[in-house]
Image (cartoon, grey):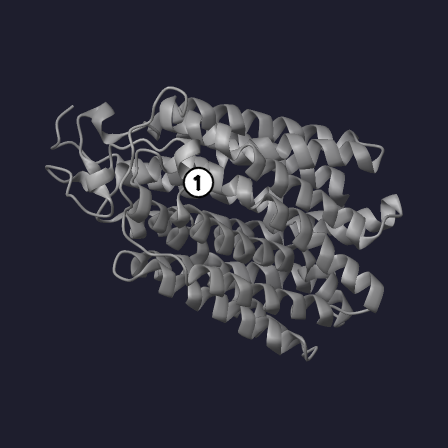
Amino acid sequence: MTQREPFRGWWIVGVGFATQAVAIGFSIMTFTLFVPLLVEEFGATRGQITLGLSTLMVVMTGVGPILGRLLDRRSIRGIMVAGAVLFAACLATMPFATALWQLGLLYGVGLAVGTAMLGPLASSTVVAKWFRRKLGRAQGLTNMGGPAGGLLFAPITGVLLARFGWRATLGCFAATTLLVIPAVWAAVRNSPADLGQHPDGEPAAPEVLGEAHGGAVWGAARLVRERAFWCMALPVGLLMSISTAWTVNFAPFAADLGVGMAQASLFIGVAAGIGILGTLLFGALADRFDGRALLWTLMGLHAAGFAYLRTLPGQAELLAMASLIGVAGGGMMPVYASLISRIFGPSSFGSVMGLAGLTMVPFFFVMPPLAASLRDASGSYVSAFGVFIAALGVAAGILGLLRVGAPEPVAVRPAEA
């Protein structure tokens, strides 16, 4: 294949968009709509149900170091296809669960691993290997898939749940997941070199965004000694866990304000759709501006939204604040992914993101059920939003210690690999 043939990178971006829409849409974005039904059927508390999402986030990020290394060294296409099969199999099995612990295993463990193999870690890794100068825009388009999954699937899920119940709805999710497998198999390749192409579809790879260190391989032992790694991973972990906690607790919070299930699902869809604009906007900005400033902006938008929600607003204000937080949530992944490439280069992108995910495990485990438990104890989410705002302040402070600019890599010895 010659360089004159169509550049495969944008096709990979499109497939990454689709896989993220499915993986995030079915595992996280629509989870909140199932909470009231599961509380009623299994006689559980909100905190117990949302612990399922926390478990999913913990397992999904916990397998990141191993999966990230595999994505850097093995067939990304094969990993994503296997993830889609596992994801669909878990969704197809969950309707047969008769106890909450069975759902917990299938959702919190099996679906979590499938999400990791099919979702943002895999798609962001392959995109990072196909783009340099246009990486922010490419990551923005790829990571539009998450909020797009909410925009598309939340309203449909609300209708399916109302008419057919949660078990049949999960069966529909499983069948839809299988549709992405042919596209992944046809489009995804590990790098432009596999097809005789170059990053960005240009004649030669430009030396930008850490490309000077693009061939360096970062081992885990080296990363955990690198200050930049911790100053990036910890604040991003706090920000993402808070955003996740808000997503999973949205429907119960809306119910407290008198918003019904159908309207709540519509609000989620609208907020996710507006979040797509945030993904595009911040993806484009990531190619031009300091990632720290962009992350501070995202933290500020979240904090402003939570501060207003503490006033227990009406339905119109709820939609406005949900949309504001949706924009900020949509911007997280492209900024984060671009920051990884800027600091550590593309060759170890999967390894860096995977290990960073492991450091975020405590945040994802604590934040969603903590918010739900505070609601159960106090009767409102006011105190939970206060905790969110305080944690965002801590994250902003840690981020201030980060210095952007590729640190000098060290060749990995076999023991570090």
Q: Quadrant of the N terminus?
A: top left
Q: Nearer the viewer, residue 158 or 149?
A: 149
Q: In which quarter of the image is residue 76?
A: top left
Q: In which quarter of the image is the C terminus?
A: top left
Q: Where is residue 362 in the image (x, y as percent from the top left)?
A: 63, 46
Q: Nearer the viewer, residue 410 or 384?
A: 410
Q: Is residue 202 left or right of residue 162?
A: left
Q: Nearer the viewer, residue 320 or 160?
A: 320
Q: Where is residue 269 in the image (x, y as percent from the top left)?
A: 57, 59
Residue extending farthest top? 414
What amino acid type should be assigned to the residue bearing mark 1? Met
Residue extending farthest front? 225
Q: Where is residue 164 in the image (x, y as percent from the top left)?
A: 75, 44
Q: Can residue 91 be seen in this view?
A: no
Please give the name of the residue rendered at 72% of the width and 72% of the height, measured from the top-left corner: 382
Q: Is residue 128 left or right of residue 325?
A: left
What residue is disc 1 on? 353
Q: Is residue 175 above or below residue 330?
A: above
Please give the name of the residue rendered at 64% of the width and 74% of the height, measured from the top-left corner: 309
